[in-house]
Amino acid sequence: MVEAPAPLTWGDLAEIGLERLKRGGRRRVEALGELGVEHLGDLLAYYPRRYLDRSREATVGELQVGEDAMVLATVEKVRAIPGRNRRARVEALVSDREGAPLNCVFFNQPWRAKQLRPEMQAVLYGRLEEFRGALQMTNPVVDLVGNRTGGIFAVYPMSAKASITTWEIADMVAEALRRCEQRGIADPVPPDLLGAHELCGRFEALRLIHNPESFADVTVARNRLVFDELLRMQLVLVRRKRERERAGEGIAHQVDRALLERFEQRLPFELTAAQSRTVAEILDDLARPWPMHRLLQGEVGSGKTVVALMAMLAVVCGGGQAALMAPTEVLAEQHHLGLSELLSSLDGGAGGLGGGRLNLGGLPPVSLELLTGRTRAGGRERILAGLASGAVDMVVGTHALISEGVAFESLGLAVVDEQHRFGVEQRAALRARGMTGGLPDVLVMTATPIPRTAAMTVYGDLDVSRLDELPSGRAGVTTRAVTEARQQPAVWERLRSEVAAGRQAYVVCPLIEESDKVEAAGAEATYDELRAGELAELRVGLLHGRLPASAREPLMASFRRGELDVLVATTVIEVGVDVANATVMVILGADRFGIAQLHQLRGRVGRGSEPGWCYLVIENPSPAAQLRLQALVDSTDGFELSEIDLELRGEGTLMDSRQTGRSDLRLASLRRDREWIPTARRAAEAICDAGGPDPVLAAEIALLLSDADIDYFDKS
Ligand code: ADP
Ligand code: MG
């Protein structure tokens, strides 16, 4: 008996060149090559950009002038009209299926004269105008569709210059699908998983995505293909996480929970529920024998420091050392100060950090040091010796912590503040400092809230804890959108009255992405204008990215000391300025910033007992900007805003901000497919628990996930 040939795997498909298709003539193969389609696998995964429903297509007669419309038309006549400068144009006369005429005018696209030829069928998308009594579209989007008739059909993405029509592509796809008929296409996803989520088979999905009979078919197909993309990605992440858990020998810390409870009772405040939950998660991780890799997400002011400190104390009391690495000296100093204050609040007035060693009264003495590039040589030597001997229990620092000559006696926990991301290598370098007794646990802190589903992808190989609750007792921030010039005097009035009451303010200048120089010039102009006008009576400082660090630091320091009332700044203030006395934030050109950035900026005020005021100033906001501003006016919850942001940013695939040549994530969208992400996550976990993906699926992952995809995940 002859065995039936095995179904075609993705590897098999990748070995079948397009020239093997009957319809794969040289011109077509070359044109597809330009689109990045090289073999049968690429072709089947070259998904339609949209679908055209012939039963619903408009005729010119049905359209209103001023309307955005889609018309299927036949090209009648084309002529190129030379003109000076950029006014050269191509005019095409087309007609719809009822013969009604429509003029199309293309400016500055001379190649249209060659692309469009009489009798071709094209779908035109554009706004219907009237010009000299005739109907016209200017620079419409054109899809060449050939002479196809029938119900719904696929329109493929094309670069304007590739000389192939969407119909020709559809034709080749159809032939490719027919050729696969005999052997079928391998489907390595376990059938029970497909059943549980009502997903169709893979071959079926490919057929339907290219050749749907209804839009319901498209949905069925899309669900399956999106699931496959997300599953492959999650398998990579989950596998990596499991490998790290298994490969590295971790440290099972002796966590003294009773001691930590005593510590907690002596804090000057009660932990929020989110903090307690997070501490519990971390302590569980610390007690386990494999290395922790946890992300702590919580916006500015959510109380990450005390959580980090409790984790560090747990490790120190269990006999290990703990390090906290911050991206800048200012931040390292702030962390050091924050930790010292918390520790000394436990000290029962015994005099703080005398000699760097602190007696917690009933708790073991803990020594805390600061190591940055600014640490003087003598101090540095003493600290290095202390780290190497174990005399120093806790250290806060910058990159200096991973520089030459730093060794720990027994590093048990590395906390990394990623306000601005460190590279993976740096985190690995810190982890590698504590090799003797096993890999240290790693806690990564970030102040940028991202949606839960996004965290599952961007930080997919970490466990995630969220501080989604701010400590009470904050006066909070009131946010106002200032969209009209006549509202502006009230803003400056408020600023002046807060300053008169002894408080301070920030004025943030518009973000100018193109250049630091232009941005600095803009900030200078704003500064001059304010000093000559609204803020004439006040002490105003100017801070921008073109200032050398040597000028920036003293400026920030004098603002911190209250010697300046107002800091006019570009977004450089994002980097860790923490002045509790500041209560007003005026953001000019607020439409230039995204929701997350505005929220981050606003977090600088209203953190103490005095209420904060944030003004988002922008004239003539676009509808999109208006929605963003309104979201900020309505909500101060960073996680909620991150979800809204995702919603407002619209479609976009997971990878859209990246420059990827070819990516496996072709269909999946963070917004549209957010429900599928946790589903794929759980499926990937189940598959890994059951021994990992089968060889066909594993091979597919290796083949389809590009280096760019993998690097993207590695940001975590
Ligand atoms: P983050 O590092 O997340 O920006 P911090 O840890 O610096 O926030 O905390 C901000 C402020 O809130 C600090 O002054 C801290 O002492 C205080 N704080 C932290 N947790 C609480 C709490 N549960 N209740 C009251 N105040 C808190
Ligand atoms: Mg902090």
Image (cartoon, rainbow, N blue to C red):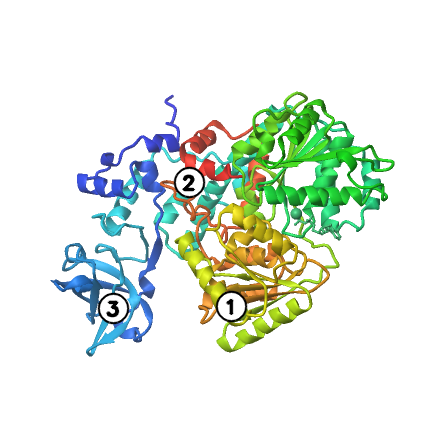
Lateral position of residue 56 relative to residue 21, left or right: right
Q: Residue at x 20, y 72 (%)?
A: 100
Q: Looking at the image, is mark 2 or mark 1 earlier in the sequence?
A: 1
Task: From the image, tell me which residue sits under label 1.
Answer: 530
Q: Position of residue 487 (x, y in %)?
A: 54, 76
Q: Which comes sooner in the sequence, label 3 or label 1?
A: 3
Find the distance from the CA under tag 2 to the CA under tag 3. Answer: 36 Å
Quadrant of the frame with the N terminus: top left
Nearer-the-camera pick, 512 or 690: 512
| Location of the C terminus (image quadrant) | top right
The one of 285 and 206 positioned closer to us in this rendering: 285
Task: Please name the residue shown 55% across and 53% down the image.
Answer: 573
Q: Quadrant of residue 246?
A: top right
Query: Considering only vertical position in the picture, is 610 above or below 367?
Result: below
Instruction: Compare residues 345 and 502 and report the one nearer the observer.
Output: 502
Height in image: 615 above or below 604? below
- Tell me if residue 398 can be seen: yes
Residue 664 - label: 2
